Image (spheres, rainbow, N blue to C red):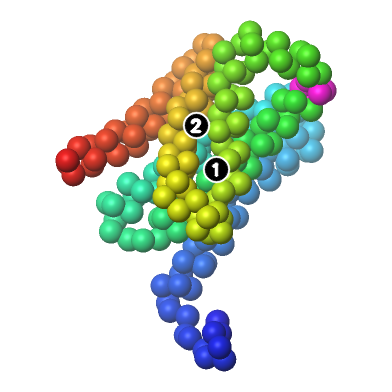
């Protein structure tokens, strides 16, 4: 790294962070690679349903992982979780976009009239659309440039991640009709992550 012709050594911590973020990047792509392999290998699955459920599940996983970074930083006393938070948030949006695209394109074939009716009639579709609508400005303003432009408003805007996570859990909860074990686990994880924040805030006051 050079600045005005001067060289600064890269610390061991910086190298470890770079390696860790590279491994995290690969880990975030593995579910997509696995889903593609299962579909392309001709396994006995409904491709559209499988891709829809897989991308939806991993959207929720990366959302919760994003929310877990702040408690992890507080509990560990290390700064690296916050440096991974943006990547996790962007991967959550990436999988949500794939989830949305699969529904609009492969499931509904861009039948916008039917899609609008679906949004109005089925609550889990309604909250799912609301979640991705709220995620979009978060992804678009995730850069350092937008942080500088928005200043304090950037933090206020990005608190939308909390209702996004709640809408995502509700979307999954209402989608599942029989075994609610997994939705309950995601809801419990979200309650724990939000409860920790409320507890820390209460201790400050």
Q: Residue at point 42% right, 42% down?
A: 156
> 39 or 201: which is nearer to us?
201
Q: Which residues are magenta?
A: 106-110
Q: Residue at point 48% right, 86% down?
A: 8
Q: Is residue 109 magenta?
A: yes
Find residue 24 and report its horizontal and vertical position in percent.
Answer: 53, 55
Q: Is residue 195 left or right of residue 16?
A: left
Q: CA gap, disc 2 to disc 1?
A: 10 Å
Give the quadrant of residue 199: top left
> 123 or 175: which is nearer to us?
123
Mark 2 and mark 1 lie on one chain; the one further toward the N terminus is 1
Find residue 107 and report its horizontal and vertical position in percent.
Answer: 76, 22
**Identity of the residue furthest to the bottom in this view:** 5
Q: Residue at point 55% right, 33% down?
A: 134
Q: Is residue 108 above or below residue 134?
A: above
> 63 or 47: which is nearer to us?
63
Give the quadrant of residue 82: bottom left
**Identity of the residue furthest to the top in this view:** 121
Residue where numbered disc 2 is placed: 164
Q: Main secondary structure of the magenta part?
A: loop
Label disc, if present, on residue 116 of the rendered structure: none
Find residue 153 and report its horizontal and vertical position in percent.
Answer: 45, 46
Q: Secondary structure at mark 2?
A: helix
Find residue 17 and report its horizontal and vertical position in percent.
Answer: 46, 66
The reply to whether residue 182 is visible in this rendering is no
Residue where numbered disc 1 is placed: 138
Look at the image and tell me in which quarter the N terminus lies: bottom right
Q: Is residue 132 left or right of residue 43?
A: left
Look at the image and tell me in which quarter the C terminus lies: top left
Q: Are marks 2 and 1 in contact (CB under 8 Å)?
A: yes
């Amino acid at each position: 790294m050079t600045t005005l012709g001067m060289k600064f050594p890269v610390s061991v911590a910086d190298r470890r962070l770079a390696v860790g973020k590279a491994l995290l990047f690969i880990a975030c792509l593995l579910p997509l690679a696995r889903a593609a392999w299962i579909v392309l290998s001709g396994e006995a699955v409904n491709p559209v349903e499988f891709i829809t459920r897989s991308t939806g599940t991993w959207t929720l996983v990366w959302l919760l992982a994003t929310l877990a970074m702040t408690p992890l930083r507080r509990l560990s006393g290390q700064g690296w979780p916050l440096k991974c938070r943006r990547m996790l948030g962007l991967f959550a949006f990436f999988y949500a976009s794939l989830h949305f695209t699969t529904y609009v394109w492969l499931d509904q074939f861009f039948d916008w009239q039917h899609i609008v009716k679906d949004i109005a009639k089925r609550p889990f579709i309604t909250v799912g659309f609301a979640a991705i609508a709220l995620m979009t400005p978060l992804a678009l303003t995730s850069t350092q440039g937008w942080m500088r432009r928005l200043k304090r408003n950037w933090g206020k805007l990005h608190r939308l991640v909390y209702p996004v996570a709640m809408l995502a859990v509700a979307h999954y909860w209402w989608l599942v009709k029989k075994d609610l074990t997994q939705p309950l686990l995601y809801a419990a994880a979200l309650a724990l992550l939000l409860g920790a924040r409320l507890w820390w805030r209460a201790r400050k006051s």
